Image (cartoon, grey):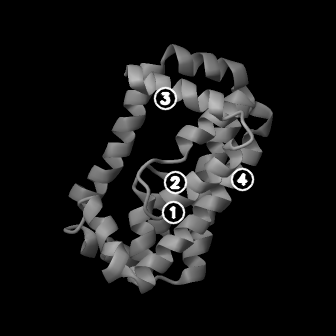
């Protein structure tokens, strides 16, 4: 946990620089289509550092995430055999791929919404949406609603509670890190073993 604490402190310090907002946008975009680290970590650090800008950060995170989801959709739609399949293999979800397709057939936008809001790996669902030719406007709308809800809830909590949240995070950092990782891993297991 020492390295994680140092990383958190480094991100918290770095999050107040002029490069923080572009970094948040890039991370949000990449996470929605191929990158494994969720943008919540940087969003929380930035919002804790400057709570008055929490909603601005959430907006940037939401827009970049939806654009990244659209890129993931494009990868699945046009380049599944060339690029998308390697992303699915990286997450070891080959066996679940058809189940995700069935879930899309049955639930359509709800599948996108669940993946966009919960710890489920949204990137896999963006690829699947393109590969299984889900209605694009519905995909974008569901992504916008679910991703925005997720990031604006985080921003709202930090804006409302501000400094006490920072104290709480610092006091219980190790426990919160474990909880966050458990939720992230649980999202992958949900897809792997339930779907």
Q: Are marks 4 and 1 in contact (CB under 8 Å)?
A: no
Vertical placement of residue 47 versus 81, above or below: above
Residue behind mark 3: 7
For label 1, the residue is 113
Give the mark nearest the N terminus, 1 or 3.
3
* Distance from Cα at disc 2 to Cα at disc 3: 25 Å
- Residue contact at pointers 1 and 2, CB within 8 angstroms: yes
Secondary structure found at label 3: helix
Residue visible at 63% across and 60% down in the picture: 64
Q: Which residue is pictured at 31% across the width and 77% down the height?
A: 102
Q: Name the residue rendered at 46%, 70% in the picture.
A: 126
Residue sitting at 61 percent across and 67 percent down?
Answer: 67
Q: Which residue is mark 2?
A: 117
Q: Dots 1 and 3: beta carbons under 8 Å? A: no
For the C terminus, the image quarter is bottom left
Work out which residue is located at the far right of the displayed protein and give it.
Answer: 52
Q: Nearer the viewer, mark 4 or mark 2?
A: 4
Q: CA distance from mark 1 to mark 3?
A: 30 Å
Let me know if residue 42 appears in the view: yes
Instruction: Specify which label sits upstream in the sequence, 3 or 4.
Output: 3
Q: Are marks 3 and 4 in contact (CB under 8 Å)?
A: no
The residues tagged by marks 3 and 4 sit, at their Cα atoms, a distance apart of 24 Å
Q: Position of residue 178 (x, y in %)?
A: 37, 29
Earlier residue among tags 2 and 3: 3
Residue 59 disc label = 4
Q: Quadrant of residue 94?
A: bottom left
């Amino acid at each position: 946990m020492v390295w994680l604490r140092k990383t958190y402190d480094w991100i918290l310090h770095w999050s107040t620089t002029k490069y923080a907002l572009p970094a948040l946008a890039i991370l949000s975009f990449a996470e929605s289509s191929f990158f494994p680290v969720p943008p919540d970590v940087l969003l929380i650090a930035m919002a804790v550092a400057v709570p008055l800008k929490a909603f601005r950060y959430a907006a940037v995170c939401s827009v970049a995430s939806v654009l990244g989801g659209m890129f993931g959709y494009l990868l699945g739609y046009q380049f599944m055999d060339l690029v998308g399949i390697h992303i699915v293999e990286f997450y070891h979800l080959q066996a679940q791929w058809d189940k995700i397709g069935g879930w899309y057939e049955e639930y359509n936008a709800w599948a996108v919404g669940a993946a966009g809001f919960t710890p489920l790996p949204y990137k896999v669902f963006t690829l699947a949406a393109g590969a299984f030719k889900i209605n694009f406007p519905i995909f974008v709308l569901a992504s916008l609603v679910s991703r925005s809800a997720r990031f604006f809830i985080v921003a709202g909590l930090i804006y409302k509670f501000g400094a006490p949240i920072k104290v709480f995070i610092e006091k219980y950092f190790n426990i919160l890190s474990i909880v966050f990782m458990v939720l992230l891993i649980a999202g992958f297991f949900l897809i792997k073993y339930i779907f």
